[in-house]
Image (tube, helix red, strand yellow):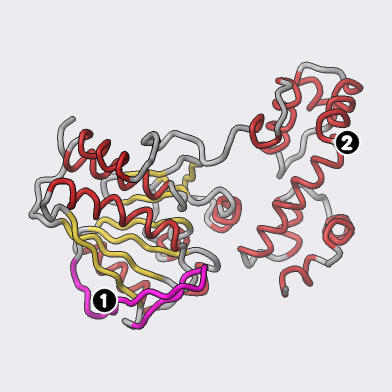
Amino acid sequence: MRLDYQGLLPETVGFLLLPRFSMMAFFSAVEPLRIANRITERALFEWTLISEDGEPVTASNGMTLLADRAIGEVHRLPSLAVCSGFGPEDSLSRPLMAWLHRLDQAGCVLGGLDTGGFLLAEAGLLEGERVTLHWESLPAFQERFPGIETSDELFELGRRRFSCAGGTAAMDMALEVIARRHGSRLAVDVSEQLIHERIRTRSDHQRMSLARRLGIHNRRLVEAVSLMERHQQVPLSLEALACRSGVSLRQLQRLFEQHLGTSPRAWYLNLRLERAWHLLAETDSDVLSVALACGFTSGSTFARAFKARYGLSPREARRD
């Protein structure tokens, strides 16, 4: 492997901590760097924690980390990871957006952990890039930024941008960075220190396979559920689902009842309503736009189905 880092050591990585950031993703990104330093007995990496005002930042788990510097004190960095979690849009501010642009113009490689891509996209710094986020946040991102290419990979590592799905995907991304910078042998050694059985590649899926997730092994049923998940904005008819899954409509009904304890119609509706819940929680799209994005033909039809499922109207759910 040709090593891609020829700069000075230690290589400095900035972590911008935003309120309610994902502590799991942050530690998963930092710990491999620390262990790489320890194994080699060299300062390959160093890191600095940054907050907008230099004050401590509380993560989504309630733990608080001290920041080393405020954004106004940082003018150049080789790379910066934007660390966020729930409600990334709450952290948007003009000073923060302007600072990210200044870093970009100075040559900083910018990236996001978990939902950090939201801020980079809002700042207009992801045009022409491919980005990944936590699978739960991808629908909201796609609705808000339809012009930005997304993926459901564990991570994306480009020349000037990077992103990862959060959680332990940040560990796999950090291990890939170590391999590219300092060789795959070191990355393997770090992985073993972390009791990380296998270094996952970027193309590994974020989620378990449908068969494992649902505890089912019938190939045709798995295909039918997969089709439902891929066609939520423009739902397929049950007849089309059955045909594309290679079964009759009656067989499809029987498979759902036998293995999932419900009808295919009810399963499909719940999938679309769950997507709607996330869009209401994570975007500012109006209720009708959310309804259309989830395959409902009218706001009233959507509202009735939503209230029957959750006991709240869409507007009440958004307020809560």
Q: Which type of secondary structure does the marked residue at label 2 adopt?
A: loop
As drawn, 227 above or below 117: above
Q: Which type of secondary structure does the marked residue at label 1 adopt?
A: loop
Which residue matches tag 2?
263
As drawn, 254 above or below 214: above
Q: Which mark is residue 68?
A: 1
Q: Position of residue 120 (x, y in %)?
A: 40, 61
Q: Amino acid at mark 2?
A: Ser
Report the residue at 86% width, 61% height from top. 307
Q: Position of residue 19 (x, y in %)?
A: 46, 74
Q: Position of residue 114 (x, y in %)?
A: 46, 56
For discs 2 and 1, the disc positioned in front in the rendered view = 1
Report the residue at 37% width, 74% height from top. 65
Q: Amino acid at mark 1?
A: Asp
**Local crowd at mark 1 within 10 Å, few (<14), some, or many (≥20)?**
some
> Which region of the structure is painted magenta?
55-76
Q: Could you tell whether 289 is left or right of 1 in the image?
A: right
Task: Classify the position of the C terminus by image quarter.
Answer: bottom right
- The stretch drawn in magenta includes residue 308: no
Q: Position of residue 220 (x, y in %)?
A: 74, 21
Q: Could you tell whether 39 is left or right of 121 in the image?
A: left
